[in-house]
Amino acid sequence: MGNVSKLLKIEYNMWWFKEHNFEKKLYKFFKVKKWKDKALTYNPELFSLKDYSLKGIANTMCKAETDHLINVLISLSTLLFSLIWGQLWIFALTALFAIAFDMQFVLIQRYNRPRVVRLIIRKSKTN
């Protein structure tokens, strides 16, 4: 499911991807700045300024966020297996761990993207 976003028209300036007022407090609470550079990146070349424009990188960040949010929804769907086999607590626990894993990447994308967008705006004003 990691490439579902390729099927969707996703752009960094869409409403969903804009920074919301509450987010900065959320990033401070989770201390995103301290650990964001330690997380794995599936394909770091997709975020290279040598190979891509700032707009391309911002769009890639939105696509990565979308992919991870889809993975979160899939994680929640595993709770349905508890209807077949019981043991809700096991499925809830694994869903929770899977959600936490994918949400770290959502937080990183949402934390970094406003800086990239500010650079895009700054660059467009100088041109």
Image (spheres, helix red, strand yellow):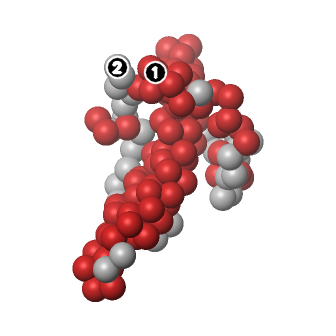
Q: Is 22 above or below relative to 107? A: above
Q: Residue at x 37, y 37 (%)?
A: 17
Secondary structure category for the residue under label 1: helix
Q: Residue at x 50, y 25 (%)?
A: 29
Q: Residue at x 45, y 62 (%)?
A: 93
122 displayed left or right of 46: left
Secondary structure category for the residue under label 2: loop
Q: Is 5 above or below relative to 113? A: below
Callout 2 environment at 10 Å: few (<14), some (14 to 19), or many (20+)?
few
As shown in the figure, which amino acid type bears the numbered disc 1?
Lys
Residue placed furthest toward the bottom: 84
Q: Mark 2 — residue?
A: 21
As shown in the figure, which amino acid type bears the numbered disc 2?
Asn
What percent of the width, then of the height, locates residue 78? 36, 72
Q: Quadrant of residue 34?
A: top right
Q: Is 56 above or below relative to 126? A: below
Proximity of marks 2 and 1: CB atoms separated by less than 8 Å: yes
83 displayed left or right of 37: left
Callout 1 environment at 10 Å: few (<14), some (14 to 19), or many (20+)?
few
Gap in angstroms between the C-alphas marked 2 and 1: 7 Å
What percent of the width, then of the height, locates residue 116? 56, 29
Q: Quadrant of residue 36?
A: top right
Location of the C terminus by quadrant is top right
What percent of the width, then of the height, locates residue 83? 25, 79
Q: Nearer the viewer, residue 45 or 94?
A: 94
Q: Which mark is residue 57?
A: none
Q: Which mark is residue 24?
A: 1
